[in-house]
Amino acid sequence: MTANNSENCGYDVVSTSFPKEICYIDAQINSLLDVHLDPRLLSVNLHCNNISVIENLDRLQHLKHLDLSSNRITRMQGLDGLMSLKTLNLSCNELRVVEGLDSLRNLVKLDLSYNVIYDLSGLKKIHGSSFSLRSLYLHGNELSSLDHLINCLAGCRMLQELTLSLYGEANPVCEIPDYRSSVLASLKNLEVLDGQDRTGKPAATRDSVLDIPEMDDYLEYLESENSSEIPSKETKYEVLTPKIDLALDRFRQRGPLSSETDAGEEKRTENPTEERAQVSRKIRNPSAEPDINRSADSESTEQPDKKKKVQLSPKARRSQWVPVSKKPGQTKTRTKPAVHVTVESTSSTSPSDEQVTQLQQEQMKVGALTKECELSKHSVKQLKGQVHQLQELLANREQEHRKAVEDLVRVDGQEMRELVEREAAKQEGFHQQIIREYQEKLNKRDLDYAALEDEFRMGLQIEANRFRELQEAFERMSDEHAQQKEALHTIKQKESKATNMVNELTAMVKEQRGRLSELSRGRQEIVGDYKERIQSLEKQLNEANKQLTRLEVLEQDKAKLTAQIRAQVSVMEGLRTERKLWSEELAQQGSSLAQDRGRMEARIEALTAEVGEVKKECQNANETIAIKAKVIEDQTDSIRKLKQKIADQDSDMRKRKEDGESREKNLEEQLAVETSANQDLQEQLDGLVDRKESLKQELRKTQVELETSKENHRILKTKWHEKSELIGKLEKEVVEMRNNLRGKEKTLIEERDKAVKAADSAVERLKVCDDAFRKQLEQERRAHEQQLQTLANEKQQEVERANNRVVEVEDEMRILLQENALTKKTLEKRLQKLTSAFTEIQHDLART
């Protein structure tokens, strides 16, 4: 992973040897969407985070190992795309139901421990031989039905290991009698149940190879017929072998030597041009030579460290001397083309000036090349000396390596024996310390037992004192009980008096209720009469309202008619005035045409526009005539024309007068008809006004009667409320008195019962305490004996484990020695190759 991811996470671990593995432990991750998941991932470990939903895993088709333990997952979902998943760890979550395992055909190991699972119906979908589930861990859940468990697991044919109880964390199923025998009988392929095989012996717990990423490719070699399986048993106390562990770590860190040397030789043969360029740079930069000499001198003067020089890889050695050995050959190849260039340049000379200049330039180049040749010869001599030094270093290191290989750990060697003796002594001392601790614990338990006996005796004495105190308290309570009986007698007498009073009060209440019932009947009758009257009045009101609406409609009609009459009257007045004006104009027709024109314009409003135009024309004509008569006497023709126009206008005016007279006659006839209709409407209005006044008087009378009836109703209501309140108060007082008396009786009876029960309970407690103390003593004795037996069994098991561990260490040492022998052979072969390479280099140097 990148540095940014490592800064964001609390604990970010990504293995450098296996880049397709991701591990975020306790990184405060809330969702899988926040994690970048490469589709090529093989292992994902997200232990101890805050993930609540399984999502964003559909693309991980190559994923083999998934660890989502110690999160907040409540449902198994989002696992459909994990076709090649082999191990799934969902322990320490909040799961309740097993589901979503349909597509996990390659799943081998499933850990669902420490959840709240009560339903395993999801395991029915992985029944059959096409699924490969072998190990299932369900301890620390809430499985209570044995039939449900067997039905869900019966079809898992490949299941070999089932865990329902481990480290004291079990399921309610485990408490059922004959649970183990029934499960093993129903699941015939099952080999291990709760860490024990079918015979009841603890099964050998092997470290699962499937948990190691990309280990499946090597299972064929590990599980071959010739290979011997070495069961690694989990023990509490491992044998410490620091030297062997160091040798194993160095052997694992070692790379493949032959492949690296071959690869280096191939690289050298593939790009000789790069090597030549490097040699030419080193020749031109003589400052690099002292560095090489210094490194060689420092390597020759350093004291050989045994462990580091033995582990020095041939690749590092070869990188020190290969570039130096290549330099002489490279300088030789560098000088050959330069001499060839000079020969060609001298043979192609001519007497021309251009050729002379070219020859001079080539001569300069030849001089430079000769200088470079001298420098390269000098460097070759120095390099030869360095090669001799390196050969001596190689020889010394080979000797040291052979000595180190000879001094390696052997089974028959003294170091191995000393190590075994030391480890055996350590184990014996450790076991003696454990025995001492157990003896100390036994002594402490004896002391605790003696202290418990003392405490039990003290407890018996304390209980005896308490019993005496309880007897004294019982006597006191009996005296108090007698006193309370006397008080009860007096209280009963008081109660009898109170009951008499209550009876009298109830009689009074009954009399008052009878009176109240009579009053209520009279009130109901009065109310009925009032209701009938109110209904009749409401009917009259409705009729009056209807008449009022009619009056309002008539008034509106009247207003409309009056408005129409007023409009007609105004029209008639206008017509009359016009008639008067027309009569005056008719009387004064002979005065002048100008006066007639003005009066006619005022009378006829409908034709104002045309009359105005005529007047304007007439005025203009008169003015023009007056002006022209005074100024121009010669324009007689124009005056004649004007006279003709005036005659035409006179004829038009006469026609209009006749039309106006006909209109006046028609208007007079209409006025006569409308006046007659108005007289009829006035008579109807007068009758309606009289009717309205009579209705108003009737309404006033009904309102006065309603107000009087309302006042009487209010007075009756107030009287009824006052009487009902008095009755309610009396009833409440009577009920309170009864409740108080009953409460006092109950308290006295309860106190008496409590005193009796306390005495009985005290006696019973004493008996229970005696029984409990006896049971505790017996349980402690049994527990003490069981602990002694378990300690003896554990001691024997630990001794057996230690012996098995010694056997395992011996087997591991044998394997190490075999591997060391193989490495010796490979090293000797490589040394032979190196010596042959050195001889070839020496021959090349001798030839040069």
Image: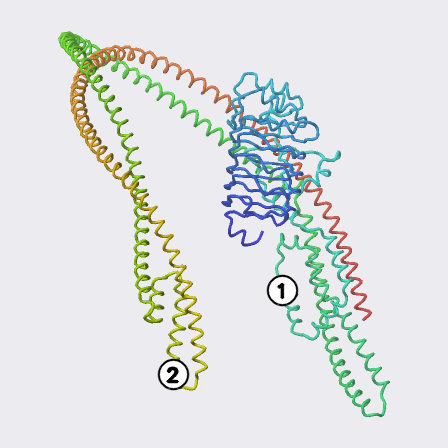
Residue 491 seen by the camera: no
Going from N to C along the chain, the mark reached first, 1 or 2, is 1
On screen, residue 429 versus residue 756, left or right, reads: right
* Camera-side residue of 34 and 338: 34
Q: Position of residue 793 (x, y in %)?
A: 54, 24
Where, quadrant-wise, is the C terminus in this rendering? Answer: bottom right
Residue 447 in the image: x percent, y percent? 38, 23
Q: Is residue 255 left or right of residue 419?
A: right
Rendering quarter of residue 456 = top left
Mark 1 closeness class: few <14, some 14–19, many ≥20 residues within 10 Å: few
Which one is in front, 580 or 493?
Answer: 580
Q: Secondary structure at mark 2?
A: helix
Kind of element beneath mark 1:
helix
Residue 770: image x %, image y %? 34, 13
Q: Which mark is residue 742?
A: none
For label 2, the residue is: 629
Q: How is the image coloured?
A: rainbow
* Kind of residue at badge 1: Ser
Which residue position holds label 1? Answer: 298
Question: Which amino acid type is marked by label 2?
Answer: Ala
Above or below residue 679? Residue 312 is below
Task: Please tell me which residue is depicted at 50% across the width and 27% down the height of the picture.
Answer: 168
Residue 258 pos. (x, y %)? 74, 53
Quadrant in the picture for residue 212: top right
